[in-house]
Image (cartoon, helix red, strand yellow):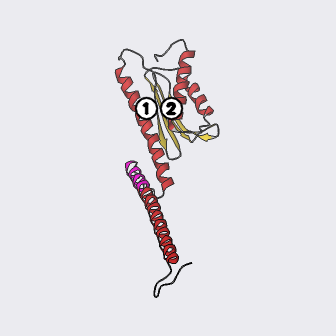
Amino acid sequence: QSHRVKGRTPLNQQALCVSVCVCERDRERGGVSMVSREHKRAAALHEKLQLLRSITHSHAVNETSIIVDASKYIEELKEKVDRLNQDLSSMQSPASEVSFPTVTVETLEKGFLINVFSDKSCPGLLVSILEAFEELNLNVVEARASCTESFRLEAISGRGEQNGESVGAHVVRQAVLQAIRDWSQSTDDQLPQ
């Protein structure tokens, strides 16, 4: 039993009041720190997305579009690396050697610009490359080819598909290179690899 002293609340009510106040204070602190941590995490993510947006020259506003633009930017960088590696390897090969045809594939708004060049005539190569286009379901919109003293192909295609998925420039380039390797193995006049 608690005894009431004049002007004071009983001791068990004071203890209960202090206990409730401590619990409420702890809950508020825990809630504040959780909200604060979540706010810091969201701010860090936002900052990283803005950095990614800046690096990739994206004009997107929402997170998904920034990530899609970054993915496209990475694909373009891969294409540039492939072209630079190809240019470097062609500079290192002796001039007296017949060179392996060079292949570049650039991404256009609705397709690809595909260039293939060899300093010698390559009978049958055009057919092999067109078969590779067909396997990727590339719809050739426009093409120019020369096969007399040298081999040159410039083709503009729509987007292609492989296994139901849209293909990128890297996949197109690899398919053309594979067609060239297959063609060179099937001819008597082997090209260096």
- In percent of width and height, residue 137 lies at 62, 37
Q: Is 24 rendered above or below residue 84? A: below
Q: Is 38 rendered above or below residue 21? A: above
Indicate which disc residue 91 carries.
Answer: none
Q: Is 193 rendered above or below residue 110? A: above
Indicate which disc residue 173 carries.
Answer: 2
The residue lying toward the viewer, choosing from 14 and 133, is: 14
The residue carrying pointer 2 sits among few (fewer than 14), some (14 to 19) or many (20 or more) residues within 10 Å by Cα, namely many
The residue under label 1 is 82
- In percent of width and height, residue 169 lies at 50, 37
Asked if marks 2 and 1 touch (Cβ < 8 Å), the reply is: yes
Identified at 36% across, 14% down, the residue is 96
43 relative position to 137: left or right: left
- Report the magenta residues as a range: 44-55
- In percent of width and height, residue 55 lies at 38, 48
173 relative position to 56: left or right: right
- Which is the main secondary structure of the residues drawn in magenta? helix
The residue lying toward the viewer, choosing from 76 and 25, is: 25
Identified at 49% across, 73% down, the residue is 15
Circle 1: residue type: Asp
Q: Is residue 45 magenta?
A: yes
- For the residues labelled 2 and 1, the Cα–Cα distance comes to 9 Å
Secondary structure under tag 2 reads helix
The residue lying toward the viewer, choosing from 156 and 45, is: 45
